[in-house]
Image (cartoon, rainbow, N blue to C red):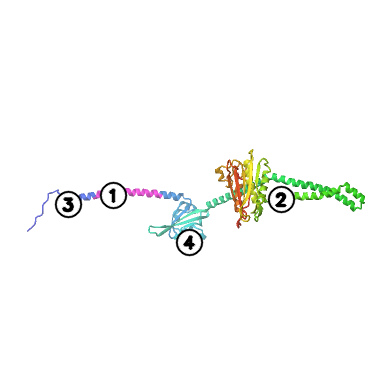
Amino acid sequence: MTKRPQQTTVGELPRTGEEAWLSVIQKMDEAYADLVDYQVQVEEQNLQLEEARTFFDGVLAAMSDVLIACDHEGRIQQVNRACEELTGKSADSLVGESIASLCTSHCQSLLTACLNRVRHEPIRDQEITLLGINGPVPLALNCSPRFNQRGRLIGVVVAGRPLGELQTAFKELNEAHAELKLAQERLVQSEKMASLGRLVAGVAHELNNPISFVYGNMHALKRYTTRLVQYFDAVQSGASGASLAQMREELRLDKVIADLDSLVEGTLEGADRVREIVNDLKQFSSTQRSEKLPYDLVHVAQSAMHWILKEHPKIIVQRELPDHLTGRGHAGQIHQVVVNLVQNAVDSIRNQDDARLTIRAGRMGSEEDGTLWLEVIDNGSGISPQDLARLFDPFFTTKPPGQGTGLGLSISYGIVAEHGGTLTVQNGKQGGQHGGVIARLELPVQPPEQDGQEQTGESGEQG
């Protein structure tokens, strides 16, 4: 039995075919929209890449340091403009060349070793010499490895800074430091000379008295010597006893002989006094290192007070000092510290009508391992809290310009520290027994022994 085919109306599509075409058209629209979005994203990414490349190229061109990127075998892949200008070669001509070829012959092996070491550790500030267009150029080289996403070494980034600018900067810095050090030494020396100059008038007066006494005695001895020589010449010529007796009376030789002992003793006493004054002055001005020896803190304080206060008779001075306080150290340096403390106190009160100064001293502990202390107290207006915290800073002074360099207390602090002691300055209690400023010095009887360089004192003053 033959089966007849099913008849359909012309222009009518099967239901399944229409749905298929609609699905295809919808998919095409979606694909086209995706392509448009993808194209937009690609264009945006290309723009970002172009901006990043421009920025990267600008950074490379602006760098003054030499930058070289090479592969793991040391073949150059990219260089910056600073490298081109330094070597006189273009980037295209350098690409593919060995980075070692840019160095001098004696540095090629060193650079190769650096490239091998960079696999394990970064290289920092390795000095090599590059072949520049104008001759060899020393560089401070830094090398860092480059790795891929799997952590495999794929290259090395080499950055080098020309040492010429650094060496020039270091040279200028060293010259400035040397000039500053020289200026500081000159200031210290000038401050010392200024302090000695303030003492010259008092010392000159001190020397004038015994020297005048010696000078007068020597003139008397010279006249007496003339008379004695005249008398002895007469004796030598065989003059009679009567004529000799008459000459003896005329020349008043009995009085001359009686005065000889007193003239000689007075001359020796004056010479001893001159020697003591000179020794004190030498101790004060000495800057040489010497062995720590016994000294009397009371004598040091009395000497400092005598020298400074001689020019200020209106200042009322109260001394609370024992007979002796024996310590061990550099007497000249301790003398210098006390002079600075007394001078500071005098400078703060010398224009007051009721200027008063107190100096006290004593001992804490035993005579063998105790501590000696000394205080210099004035009745001035004191020191402001902000200045009090900076008193021991070098070159800081509260005195008017030209009246102090600000070195005295700083140097004194170093001297006291070298002796194992302490130096403090604080305001007194206003309204109590003492106002103004209290400067306290504490020194061990036996200072610690130091193997290093000892502090050499320089005279100065501090406000």
Please, is residue 463 above or below residue 97 in the view?
A: above
Characterize the local packing of mark 2: few (<14), some (14-19) or many (20 or more) Cα atoms within 10 angstroms.
Answer: few
55 left or right of 268 in image: left
Residue at horizontal 66 percent and vertical 43 percent from the top = 317
- Which comes sooner in the sequence, label 4 or label 3? 3
User: Residue 34, labelled with which disc?
Assistant: 1
Amino acid tagged 4: Ala
| Magenta span contains residue 228 | no
Amino acid tagged 3: Thr
State the separation of the CA atoms marked 4 and 3. Answer: 76 Å
Q: Are marks 3 and 1 in contact (CB under 8 Å)?
A: no
- Which comes sooner in the sequence, label 1 or label 4? 1
Which of the two marks, 2 or 1, is nearer to us in this view? 2
Residue matched to label 4: 113
How many dots with numbers? 4
State the separation of the CA atoms marked 2 and 1. Answer: 109 Å
Residue matched to label 2: 276
Q: Where is residue 383 in the image (x, y as percent from the top left)?
A: 58, 42
User: Residue 16, labelled with which disc?
Assistant: 3
Characterize the local packing of mark 4: few (<14), some (14-19) or many (20 or more) Cα atoms within 10 angstroms.
Answer: few
Front one among 32 and 375 = 375
Which image quarter: residue 79? bottom left
Question: Is the C terminus in the top left, top right, bottom left or bottom right quadrant?
Answer: top right
Q: Do the residues labelled 2 and 3 touch (CB within 8 Å)?
A: no
- Can the viewer see residue 407 in this picture? no
Magenta span main SS: helix
Q: Residue furthest top?
A: 353
- State which region is magenta: 27-53
- Which comes sooner in the sequence, label 2 or label 3? 3
State the separation of the CA atoms marked 2 and 4. Answer: 73 Å
Q: Position of residue 425 (x, y in %)?
A: 58, 46
User: Residue 307, labelled with which disc?
Assistant: none
